Amino acid sequence: MKVNKDKETIRQYLSDESAAFSAKPDNVEAVYFPETEDELVEIIRTFKGKITISGAGTGITGSRVPIHGGIVISTERMIKPGKRVQCRELSHKGLAGDFFIYLDEEKHLAHAGPGTSISELACVLPRNMIYPPDPTETSALLGGTVATNASGARCFYYGPTRNWVVGLRLVLSDGEVVDVRRGRTFADENGIINFTSETGKHYRIRIPEYHMPDVKNAAGLYSKPGMDLIDLFIGSEGILGIISEISIKLIRVDKEPVSILAFFRSENDAMGYVDIIRDMKDRGILAIEYFDRNALDFIRAQFPEIKPDLDAAILLEMKAESLDTLAEISELLSRFNEVEDWCATTSSDLRDLKEFRHSLPDSVNAYLKRHESYKIGTDFVVPVRQFPRMMTKYKEVGEKFKHRFPRTGTHYVIFGHIGDCHLHFNFITASDGERVYAKELYLELARTAIALGGTISGEHGVGKKTLLVEGRNIPYLELMYGESGIREIARVKRELDPELRLNVGNMGVV
């Protein structure tokens, strides 16, 4: 097992993709690179201080940032799961070496290490098998996506990571290993879950007592009556245990999906189109993505073929088996005054439209880096019936920001998973004054989303994010669940991590 105490190496693990969080190098003793579960157990039992678990660093909430010191455990070399004799062994050369997965083709299951990236997983799987959640950031490690219950565009149809994880092996803060399988262990009528480690140690947990919104949600520990134990760990952001192995469901897909990118001069027309397409989900609509006028203007230099004076674009992805709906969709586009569309039916065309989708967040990140700024972007989801009100609020806040700081250039962009009523509002800030005001407006948007019955995090988790509220810096999650909610999460954490060693600061627990 490699252990690196070099300051230059340590610096690579002191921040994440957001650039909004950073830790002091002198507070971090070393970075550990275990390759096996046994090595992970050895670290936990030998080192008694604070431990921060790191994936690929693609997160934007500071979850992997070791601001409380101690050591960092990087899972990037954990790319070989335990051998399954009745499964087909598949291997491929990745960035961290030769990684393996074990594939049960009959049951459509794959067993992988947490250090396997989403792109590497796709590369090693047979061409006709896919992992449906398809998180947007393909360089993210599988373990990180499970820890945050990540999602992507196709989660409109397939649901988030949680829906596709059927097994986890985890190392707890006391060095005990638990093997959690979906469908085996549930909360009783009193909200109590009992389970044992592989050595027979018994654990008794009462699930968090708060109400989760009935929308796509990645904020806080999962809590539902009668819930499965595995769901407590999925999306737990590393505060309950360290993932050492993952078992996921796959599906067989014999044909590439079809994508249609439609452009509109009226946002009302675009929204009318979305409202009808959203109701067609069960007919094979995989994803519905939105780009506002500012978003299109922001990437026009990369895509000069985008016509001027467009108000919105909608990217639709559908199963190839749903081609019988194309005539109906064409009729809808005509009805809602579509200006033009780009249709993708081949692998090459699909890659081009995927590049279009990814170009916006990449361009925003590049702009902010040039201006030595950081991302202030939302991850809110609201119920369908409340979406028009949230959209009105986005526009109102955007214009307030633009009016306060008149200048050339884009002030904000709105884009994302409109099928799930899950848009990302990104402030494009260029000065300290703009960033201060953007955070005030961010709070205004967050409160609106909560008041409408939504969530403050649809796919990114909350990590170590905080907000200034009435002169007090509070954990981001407190805004949604209150102080009592943070206490509930802390109570559950202490039952598995009594000394508060793992990923301290995530979900506001310190």
Image: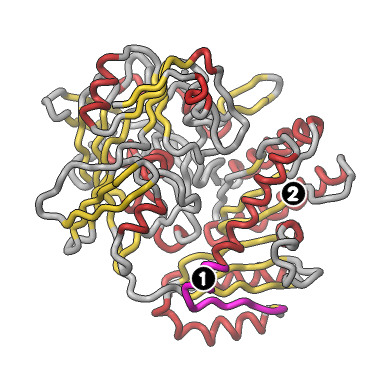
Colouring method of the image = secondary structure
Please name the residue shown 55% across and 46% down the image.
454
User: Where residue 451 appears, x then y in whole percent?
Assistant: 61, 42
- Which residue is the site of mark 1? 350
Looking at the rendered structure, the number of numbered marks drawn on it comes to 2
Can you tell which quarter of the image residue 414 is in?
Answer: bottom right
Q: Is residue 3 toward the left or the right of residue 28 in the image?
A: left
The alpha-carbon separation of the residues under discs 2 and 1 comes to: 27 Å
Residue under pointer 2: 412
- Residue at position x 39%, y 79% from top? 321
The boundaries of the magenta stretch are 339-352
* Percent of width and height locating residue 455: 54, 43
Mark 2 crowd level (few <14, some 14–19, many ≥20, 10 Å Cα): many
Q: Secondary structure at mark 2?
A: strand
Looking at the image, can residue 226 be seen?
Answer: no
Q: Is 421 rendered above or below residue 325?
A: above
The amino acid pointed to by label 2 is Tyr
Q: x, y percentage for residue 97?
A: 33, 43
